C-alpha cells in the first residue's frame, strides 16, 4: 500500500472542484471590472470629444 486512504482522494477532488469554482468566479470579476473600466473610458472620451470635460 502507498499509505493513502480512499477518503484522501475524495477530499482532493472536492478541494479541486472548489478551486475551479473560485477560479471561474474570480475570472468573472476580472472580466466585469474590465468591462466597467472600458465603458467608463468610452463615456469619458465621448464627453471630452464634445468639450464637456477636459
Image: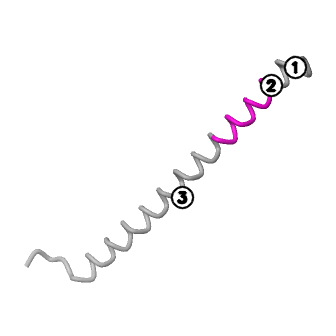
Of mark 3 and mark 2, the one earlier in the sequence is 3
Element class at badge 3: helix
| Mark 3 closeness class: few <14, some 14–19, many ≥20 residues within 10 Å | few
Which residue is label 2 attached to?
46
Point out the residue furthest to the right here.
52
Which residue is label 3 attached to?
25
Element class at badge 2: helix
Which residue corresponds to the image point at 54% horizontal and 53% vertical from the top-left? 26
Marks 3 and 2: which is nearer the front?
2
Q: How far apart are marks 1 and 3 (CA)?
A: 38 Å
Task: Indicate the position of residue 6 as horizontal and vertical percent values.
Answer: 22, 82
Which residue corresponds to the image point at 27% horizontal and 77% vertical from the top-left? 8
Which residue is label 1 attached to?
50
Cβ–Cβ under 8 Å for marks 1 and 2: yes
Q: Which of 11 and 38 is in front in this view?
A: 38
- Please tell me whether residue 11 is drawn above or below residue 22 in the rendered image: below
Horizontal arrangement in the rendering, residue 42 relative to residue 51 (left or right): left
Please provide the residue range marked out in magenta.
35-45
Amino acid at each position: 500500500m502507498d499509505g493513502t486512504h480512499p477518503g484522501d482522494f475524495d477530499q482532493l477532488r472536492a478541494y479541486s472542484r472548489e478551486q475551479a469554482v473560485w477560479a471561474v468566479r474570480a475570472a468573472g470579476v476580472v472580466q466585469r471590472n474590465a468591462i466597467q473600466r472600458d465603458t467608463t473610458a468610452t463615456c469619458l472620451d465621448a464627453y471630452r470629444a464634445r468639450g464637456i470635460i477636459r
